[in-house]
Amino acid sequence: MTPKVVLVTGVSRFLGGHLAARFAANPDIERVLGVDTEPPPRDLLRRMGRAEFVRADIRNPLISKVISTANVDTVVHASVTASPAGPTGRTVMKEMNVIGTMQLLAACQKSPKVQKLVVKSTSAVYGSSSRDPAVFTEDMGPKDLPSSGYAKDAVEVEGYVRGFGRRRPDVNVTTLRFTNFIGPRIDTVLTRYFALPVVPTVLGYDARVQLLHSEDALAVLERATLHDLPGVFNVGGDGVLLLSQAIRRAGRLNLPVPSAAVPTVGGFFRSARLVDFSPDQMRFLNWGRVVDTTLLRKEFGFTPRWTTQQAFDDYVSGRGLKPFIDPETIASAERGILDAAARFR
Amino acid sequence: MAGARVIPLHDPERDAARRSRHVEVVPEPAQQQSETPDWERRLADLLSFARRRIAGDYQIDEFGFDRDLTENVLMPPLKPLYEKWFRVETIGLSNIPTAGGALIVANHSGTLPLDALMTSYGIAAEHPAQRHMRMLGADLVFRTPLLGALARKSGQTLACNPDAERLLSSGELVGVWPEGFKGIGKPFKDRYKLQRFGRGGFVAAALKTGTPIIPCSIVGAEEIYPMIGDIKALARLFGFPYFPVTPFFPLLGPLGAIPLPSKWYIEFGEPIRTDVFGENAADDPMLVFNLTDQVRETIQQTLYRLLTQRRNVFLG
């Protein structure tokens, strides 16, 4: 069933905005509504074309009016976010994530026209610890429930979504658990982290990192909206990078910080407005997280175009990250040493 | 901005360049062996390894196994320990299949898990297929900084059923020491007495994936650090499962950490098939218990047999 009227939340951010733009370019969709608390940046707004922007707070019951008067039949909830707006934004972020979702779901439940709900969730719901299996499948849960931050928000959001699914069994609900996004255009905590000239890591830990190219993320969200694919799906690129390996591929310098000094260093980077890591993201940097994407391939019918490594390399070249040591220098040094050695033969 | 791009994966030009450089760096052994001295080839290998490491140009699997690092850095130091110090003799290596999933179940001893290291080195070095054994380790290993990261890079993963089944069904050779800390940290007087085999989780994993179980008996590891005492208070303080006292440790300090040069035998027994029990065999607790006992008995009997054949702990 191709949707007629689509409502996308979080359009002032990368994913929501570009998703609205894709829907606007699809002639089968009659109307595209983009909702956010602040208007999208101008270039994003231009991309969105015929999509209509509604400046509304999804925490406000007003959203219910938007959904019912516009006859929205498909809701894409892409506004659950990990990046707080500034150092004091954590509380606001939580409000937006959890209370916003509650209001949005309440509005969807009220409107009989809503037929489909697509929720952008995160693989952070699995937590991250040393006691976890190496690869998470959709039926696993976290060993310890995340006590704060984005991961907790996401767990609560998924809980409300499940509740909504029970109360409105006629609605197709697709929950997508994304791994971390990467790509030349998207701005996330990780893209800012790897762009630091010296990348701090926690001494003695090397996380396994699975990434998803932002274009693949958009394609998955689009597919979930255009087709009826209810269920919970892990979404991530093939393959894994170790954190140390990723830093090397980006040509950055790795600075291992002893765990005791991590809060201080983290505080410094936060106050310098470079990177803001929440405690659950710090745990992710220790242990990492890998998800199984068999369901995505077999049932959802999508294979990511970029592997984790390719996506990361695309990010590195797209951002023009200058490696600390030029790979050509290393290669020529290698040749030089071998030539010198040959002369001693 | 020249040279700012780091390793595009699918750039044919670069791939070709790398391939040609690869040929340049690693000479064809057949043609050039006579002219290229051995040290020079080793230097070339070392340099290309260093270049790969600096550029991050290597693959790891979803468990974090870094084959490049394991083969070039982690395995070589075990060679003298395996060949010269413990003079390990492996028996029945042909019982390990050359391909496909299989579960090696072994007895655990020796205060420090050197038996696991030696078994995995033995298979990697002496088995015709040079397979890497993927071991299932305790939670404590992965919680410990440095050690945990190193364990993952060398192919180990957490001992839990999802991981074991995933490895087995993807055709890996998996090693498990079901006695765990009860086995490795048992007093010297209990040597070669098998402890309880966990809850049989490893048997359930093998049954679910239909992979054979290969019992493995290790003789010699019990004598490397004869544990005559256990300081419980210190163990609690450090969060260890035990704090060993051997005749030389902690008396001689770091010197006490040198293992005694016992002579080792590692015997791999006949594979026990698990694909003959039908579909839902893993859900039959009685079958799981019986198989667990069968594996345990096989290992215990082999241990006794090897011990009666051994004349001297150090000379074999």
Image (cartoon, coloured by chain):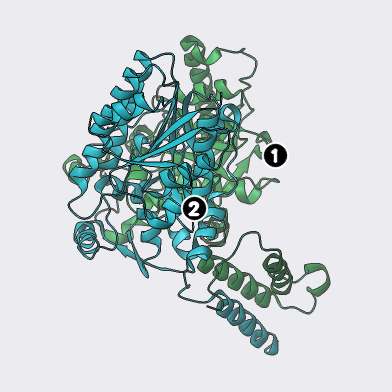
Image location of residue B181, percent across then percent down: 35, 36
Image location of residue B221, percent across then percent down: 45, 43
Residue A11 is tagged as none
Q: From where the camera sits, is residue A175 visible?
A: yes
For label 1, the crowd category at 10 Å Cα-Cα, with few meaning under 14, some 14 to 19 and many 20 or more, is some
Q: Quadrant of residue A42?
A: bottom left
Q: Which residue, given by chain and number where applicable, does mark 2 sit on?
A: A241
Q: Residue at x 20, y 60 (%)?
A: A267
Q: From where the camera sits, is residue B156 visible?
A: no
User: Foreground: A207 or B137?
Assistant: A207
Figure disc tally: 2
**What's under tag 2, amino acid-wise?**
Leu
Display colour for chain A? cyan
Identify the image quadrant of the C terminus of chain A: bottom right
Alpha carbons under labels 1 and 2: distance apart: 28 Å
Q: Which residue, given by chain and number where applicable, does mark 1 sit on?
A: B98
**What's under tag 1, amino acid-wise?**
Thr
Q: Is residue B33 rendered to the left or right of residue A131?
A: right
Display colour for chain B? green
| Callouts 1 and 2 on one subunit | no
Q: Quadrant of residue B119?
A: top right
Tell me the chain of label 1: B
Picture layout, residue A106 above or below residue A275 = above
